[in-house]
Amino acid sequence: MTRLIRSALHLTWPAVVLVAITCLAGCQAPPANVQQDESAVRQVFENYLKSVNAADLPLASDVWLQSADVVAVTPFGRFQGWDQVRDEVYIKFLQQSLTERDLQPSNVSIHTMGDSAWLAFDWAFKGKMTAGPAIESKGWESHVYQRTDRGWKIVHLHYSVPPPPPPVSP
């Protein structure tokens, strides 16, 4: 009897493994769609960079979701809704406070999952204040994107700057 059970297990084990592998393979998104989605998100990100560097409101309006649910967290404030992001980040900061803007990304990583995507990068920013002094800063930024009927849109942005160095003891 045990010999019969062993024989049955020996014959059915490869079939069970094959069925499991087939099921797992069917659960994964096709690589072409993932690559296509990542490419589309990268294009929105590139347009976001252009919108910041040019303080371009029409371009910004195209990359951000036009929603009250949008959130942008920055060192100079937390802004809820596209209207606040537009007014506080693009108009008051980028257009009115700066005469020059140069946001440069590095170490960009993009991940997609269905209708959501997230992106993180390191940044270096150089600008010139309206009052005259030049500014430079570095930090990290992350975005959350949502697929819409009008393409991928930014729905959340969070950026951080390094903390100041600790005070030097006398």
Image (tube, rainbow, N blue to C red):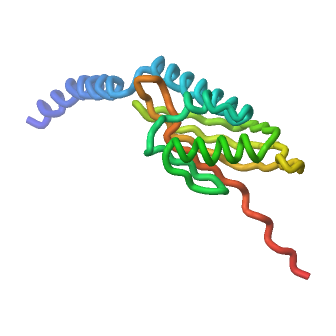
What residue sits 15% from the left and 28% below the top? 8
- Residue found at the very far right of the displayed protein: 170
What residue sits 72% from the left and 49% below the top? 139
| Residue 69, quarter of picture | top left
- Residue found at the very far top of the displayed protein: 32
Q: Is residue 60 above or below residue 130?
A: above
Numbered disc total: 0
Q: Is residue 159 above or below residue 164?
A: above
Q: Is residue 127 left or right of residue 27?
A: right
Q: Quadrant of the C terminus?
A: bottom right
What residue sits 77% from the left and 43% below the top? 124
- Residue found at the very far left of the displayed protein: 1
Viewer-side residue, 143 vs 113: 143
Viewer-side residue, 83 vs 47: 83
What residue sits 47% from the left and 21% below the top? 31
- Residue found at the very far bottom of the displayed protein: 170
Place of residue 163 in the rendered image (x, y in percent of width and height, measured from the top left): 73, 62
Place of residue 103 in the rendered image (x, y in percent of width and height, measured from the top left): 75, 38
Q: Is residue 131 above or below residue 40?
A: below
Place of residue 154 in the rendered image (x, y in percent of width and height, measured from the top left): 52, 36
Viewer-side residue, 112 vs 149: 149
Q: Quadrant of the N terminus?
A: top left
Q: Is residue 132 left or right of residue 43?
A: right
Q: Is residue 71 above or below residue 8?
A: below
Place of residue 73 in the rendered image (x, y in percent of width and height, measured from the top left): 58, 52
Viewer-side residue, 32 vs 12: 32
Q: Is residue 78 left or right of residue 134?
A: left
